[in-house]
Image (cartoon, helix red, strand yellow):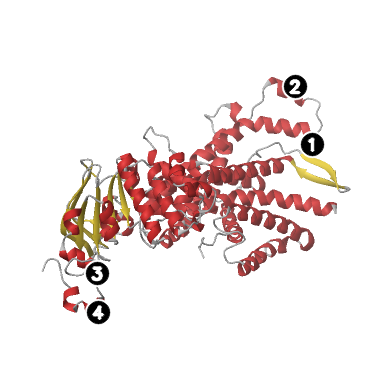
Amino acid sequence: MGQIAQYAINGLMSGAIYALIAVGIVSVYKATKVVNFAHGYLIMFGAYFYYTFAVIFPGMDWAPAWLASWQPGWMTEMREGLTMFSPMGAVLDWAANLPRIVFGLAGALVCNAILGRIIERVLMRPLMGQSVFAMIMVTVGLISILSGGAQLIWTADADFVPTIAPNTPLRFEMFGTMIFLFGADLVNMVIALLMFGGIVLWVRYTKGGIAIRATAEDQSTAYSMGISVPKVFSRAWVLASTTGAIAGAILATRNGISPSLGLFGFSVLAIVLMGGLDSYVGVFIAAMSVGVLEAMTQWKMGGDWAEIVPYVTVLVVLIWRPHGLFGQKEVERI
Amino acid sequence: MLTIENIEVTYHHTVQALRGLSLEVPDGKIVTLLGTNGAGKTTTLKAASNLLALENGEVGEGRISFNGQSIMSIQPDRLVQQGLFHVREGRRVFTEMTVEDNLIAASYALDQRKVKPDYDKVYDFFPRLKERRRQVAGYLSGGEQQMLAFGRAMIARPELILMDEPSLGLAPKIVEEIFDTIKRLNTEDGTSILLVEQNAGVAFGVADYGYIMESGQIVMEGDVAKLRNDKDIQSFYLGMSDDGSDARQSFRDVKHYKRRKRWLS
């Protein structure tokens, strides 16, 4: 029983990150009806921006020393007498990294927002009024541009980045067994869930969200309500790229940074299809179930199966419900 | 208020929909535009609200001005904010959103104007909408959807409403209600209205001035009183017999060549 809880928690933690990635795909789809195949690579850029601002820049000659490693007097004092691998030590390690973590996240958010805006303005906007299919093909082309671009700028070498939260190991008892997890993973999950929830509430209850939904349903009528449709488009892309930046940073802290991060986008695309392209709730449930399923398969059947079983489930769900779990079929009066 | 001078519109660079159409909507008046299917009425309205570009249409020649200012380079959403509101053909409510959210969407028309949206006014006007304000708009009846379409127009506080076939697919009793509303919008708020209709009888009931169009051109215009007494209009649009009496005429009695009469021949 305890083992199940352990793996379920692991699954929920990766599920939350899937959900955060999915939110970008759903938002762009809702507003523009474009399935963004390149979203994974947008995330990869977010991860590399985080790497640039948190690792490369602080290591440069011109960067102040406190940016790379912040060691005020009181911190060195506290460090004295601590044993190796003590929780306090992990917190202090994190505190020393704090300036570059904040710098890295801020840089990733801003740069990715700019990137998303440029993509929308240069590649998507000129295709407005053409068939949606044209725009979808553009996002497919974008994959090559982004993955090639990242290798040109940052080379294909893998590297590590500082975790966002102190990586203290946490142990507690649940159902009679010891559960073991890392503090950073827990904080990542909380960040992902908060961002997801915030966006869902924003779309459902604010005027800006109504503009997105109105545009999603009928572009020309949205125009005739005074809604600036191009503005809604770029807002959706900026939303996708900023949530993607955070998701990318989190992924980079878990798996290290490398161009293969972009591939995450495809597995999340399957999750999004399973949940229903335009439903935040459905996508959330799908992301969490795939996360848990992955963890469970890993436990019972080993790592090789973990990559297959969840996606077979996705296929089965899609055969059973082609619109996805909660995808909206058109409202029809009977 | 709105002046359209001699415009030509083509779709996809090939299909010519309007050929030299001119019309004018004076301040505070209701002007009706009548014509058969495919005459170009809806195209005229889309040209005036700048929505043509979204459907690969293009205004080739001529000028359209709203309040003395050319609309050609104004984005459609800005145009709405300046007071020109287009109630689209077939109502076009946002079916997946609630009644309330539909009205909030229309409040974007008030951006950059220092006016607050007056939802209560809409609900006073249409108590039915108030009862159903949390309901998804797609499940409203046709009449209620038309009320919602009008409600959105009221939220936007326009100076001019372009109204595309408000009677489409509605029962005669509802049509009557809808046209009362149009009259009220005009008299109470002083809103000018350009009304496109197929149902000439009800349109003449509210309008001050009328235009008749056929294959992309205006073929006749005049005060409603004058149009109403015109023999051709009586037989083509009002379904009266040639001698002007109210006696209904059977289509069987109309000679074929006569029914195909062209206005300009």
Q: Amino acid at mark 1?
A: Phe
- Is any atom of residue B61 visible in this view? no
Q: Quadrant of residue B259?
A: bottom left
**Mark 4, residues whose alpha carbon is within 10 Å: few (<14), some, or many (≥20)?**
few
Q: Is residue A114 left or right of residue A44?
A: left
The residue under the point 55% across, 59% down is A328
A98 or A333, which lies in front?
Answer: A333
Which is nearer the N-term, disc 2 or disc 1?
2
Name the quarter where the N terminus of chain A is drawn.
bottom right
Q: Amino acid at mark 3?
A: Ala
Indicate the chain on which mark 3 is placed. B
- Is any atom of residue A312 visible in this view? yes
Query: Which is closer to the viewer, label 1 or label 4?
Result: 4
The residue under the point 61% across, 35% down is A101
A33 or A7, which lies in front?
Answer: A33
Q: Amino acid at mark 2?
A: Glu
Q: Are marks 2 and 4 in contact (CB under 8 Å)?
A: no
The answer to whether residue A45 is above or below residue A102 is below
Q: CA distance from mark 2 to mark 3?
A: 106 Å
The answer to whether residue A277 is above or below residue A243 is below
Which is nearer the N-term, disc 4 or disc 3?
3
Q: Is residue B249 left or right of residue B155?
A: left
> Residue A85 has which mark?
1
Indicate the chain on which mark 4 is placed. B
Query: Which is closer to the viewer, label 4 or label 3?
Result: 3
Q: Give the labeled residue for mark 2.
A: A77
Q: Give the labeled residue for mark 3.
A: B247
**Are the residues under badges 4 and 3 in a single subunit?**
yes
Could you tell me which secondary element the residue under label 1 belongs to?
loop
Q: CA distance from mark 2 to mark 4?
A: 106 Å
| Residue B222 pos. (x, y %) | 16, 54
